[in-house]
Image: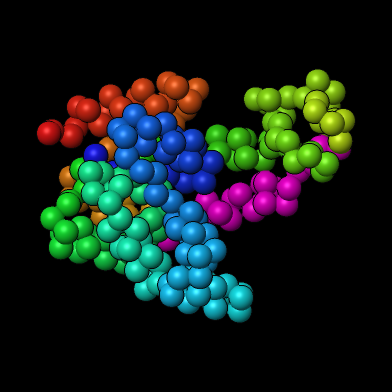
């Protein structure tokens, strides 16, 4: 299975990526992990990326594209892969299509996790983090025994700045502007499969596998 996972922040992509990669026996490839690996090991691409990061600049698509191309050339990705966090825009998607065409390993599907903005805001803005041990709780889904107090160490729970409703709303706007157009890109190629990302983790995973099994003909 050669698969891309897309969806807005808060849709549960990271969680589902782990489950789907395990089910299909393929590596879960996230751009964050690729960046960290290259920078930690001081590869040529890693040092180039670090030069941008150290200046407070965004790493350009050209560098990201080369990192992903290199990762997909590894032996463990030859029988399939799940990409999470790439491509983020149509230009990256077009580069990926060329890379996979050259390797004669076209995509099987692009799985979109669909969820309403209101639900995303409720999920993310309700998160609370312990100042002492960094444990996570939620005002709706995972309440602490005592409001505002960590169950594990009795530290104070607080809302991180990036979990505020204003920041989440902006992240969703950025997603709509930059990433959402790739959904139309893959839909036009007949690769897009969309499932609702609501329910518990196992239920969503089962829904995803059923949809992929029905759509992807081996």
Left or right placement of residue 30 versus residue 3 in this view: right
| Residue 177 visible in the snapshot | no
Q: Classify 215 as above or below 146.
A: below
* Position in image of residue 138 (x %, y %): 69, 31
| Residue 16 visible in the snapshot | yes
Given residues 62 and 198, the one toward you in this image is 62
Q: Classify 29 as above or below 122.
A: below
- Residue at 50 percent of width and 75 percent of height: 47
- Residue at 55 percent of width and 34 percent of height: 119
Q: How is the image coloured?
A: rainbow
- Residue at 44 percent of width and 36 percent of height: 18
Given residues 121 and 50, the one toward you in this image is 50
User: Which region is colored magenta?
Assistant: 156-178
Secondary structure predominantly adopted by residues drawn in magenta:
helix
* Position in image of residue 177 (x %, y %): 44, 60
* Position in image of residue 170 (x %, y %): 58, 55
The answer to if 210 sits in the magenta stretch is no
* Position in image of residue 155 (x %, y %): 86, 35
* Quadrant of the image containing the C terminus: top left
Instruction: Answer with the quarter of the image where residue 154 lies.
Output: top right
Given residues 95 and 118, the one toward you in this image is 95
* Total tally of numbered discs in the picture: 0
Q: Classify 173 as above or below 6.
A: below
The answer to if 165 sits in the magenta stretch is yes
- Residue at 30 percent of width and 55 percent of height: 74
Left or right placement of residue 184 versus residue 118 in this view: left
Given residues 149 and 182, the one toward you in this image is 149
* Quadrant of the image containing the N terminus: top left
């Amino acid at each position: 299975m050669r698969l891309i996972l897309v969806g807005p922040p808060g849709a549960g992509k990271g969680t589902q990526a782990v489950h789907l990669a395990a089910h299909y026996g393929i590596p879960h490839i996230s751009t964050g992990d690729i960046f960290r690996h290259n920078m930690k090991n001081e590869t040529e691409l890693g040092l180039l990326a670090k030069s941008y990061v150290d200046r407070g600049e965004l790493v350009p698509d050209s560098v990201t594209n080369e990192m992903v191309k290199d990762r997909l050339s590894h032996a463990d990705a030859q029988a399939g892969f799940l990409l999470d966090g790439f491509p983020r825009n149509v230009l990256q998607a077009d580069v990926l299509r060329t890379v996979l065409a050259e390797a004669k390993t076209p995509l099987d599907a692009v799985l979109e996790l669909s969820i309403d903005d209101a639900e995303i805001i409720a999920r993310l803005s309700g998160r609370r983090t312990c100042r002492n041990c960094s444990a996570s709780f939620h005002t709706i889904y995972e309440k602490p025994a005592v409001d505002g107090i960590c169950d594990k160490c009795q530290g104070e729970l607080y809302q991180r700045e990036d979990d505020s409703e204003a920041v989440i709303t902006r992240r969703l706007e950025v997603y709509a502007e930059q990433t959402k157009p790739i959904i139309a890109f893959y839909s036009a190629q007949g690769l897009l499969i969309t499932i609702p990302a609501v329910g518990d983790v196992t239920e969503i995973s089962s829904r995803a596998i059923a949809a992929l099994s029905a759509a992807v003909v081996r």
